[in-house]
Image: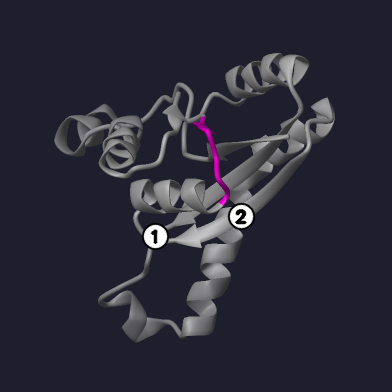
Amino acid sequence: MANILVPVQEGQDVVWLVNYLRKIQQRESVRVHLLSVQPRYTGLVQLFFSVRDMDLFRAEDATESLSPMRQALARTNIPFNWHVRTGDKATEIVKFAREIYCPQIILGPTTGNWMFDVLFGTLNGRVESLIRLSDKRCEVL
């Protein structure tokens, strides 16, 4: 059974992802790992909220971001697990892919913020760069 990592992100095309995963599932048995990477709260935020509150905020945000993909995969009977990490998105995606020995990361098309992409690069590009720097072979789509 092949592991496929699907990091969830804002503006993600859930329909495209599910259709793509269905095509893969027809060829081979897969287990999808949904990953939500939540940002670290730093600076002034820590002055106003307890660590417990910040953990609750992250958990709520992660549950909300994972919900559309979890529902779509449950309807298609594609087996999946979901995971939550905290930190830089691209770095955490690559670290998690290494941990689960994932040969494929599927980010798919998004309707992201083009200005952010121009200034900092797309998430796909940042993940591909980190994969190339590591010795891990992993396809990023």
Q: CA distance from mark 1 to mark 2?
A: 14 Å
Horizontally, is 82 left or right of 113 in the view? right
Colour style of the rendered protein structure:
one colour
Mark 2 element type: strand
Q: Position of residue 6 (x, y in %)?
A: 56, 37
Q: How many marks?
A: 2
Mark 2: few/some/many CA within 10 Å (<14, 14-19, 20+)? some
Is residue 104 one of those drawn in magenta? yes
- State which quarter of the image contains the N terminus: top right
Mark 1 element type: loop
Q: Residue at x 45, y 27 (%)?
A: 139
What residue does disc 1 label? 39
Q: Amino acid at mark 1?
A: Pro
Is residue 37 one of those drawn in magenta? no
Q: Is residue 56 above or below residue 26?
A: below
Q: Which mark is residue 83?
A: 2
Q: Position of residue 34 (x, y in %)?
A: 61, 43
Horizontally, is 54 left or right of 70 in the view? left
Q: Nearer the viewer, residue 134 or 83?
A: 134
Residue range corresponding to the magenta coloring: 100-105
Q: Which mark is residue 85?
A: none
Could you say which quadrant of the image residue 141 lies in? top left
Q: Residue at x 43, y 28 (%)?
A: 140
Q: Residue at x 41, y 46 (%)?
A: 94
Could you say which quadrant of the image residue 48 lies in? bottom left
Q: Which callout, 1 or 2, points at the residue further toward the start of the chain?
A: 1
Horizontally, is 16 left or right of 49 in the view? right
Q: Residue at x 41, y 25 (%)?
A: 111
Q: Amino acid at mark 2?
A: His
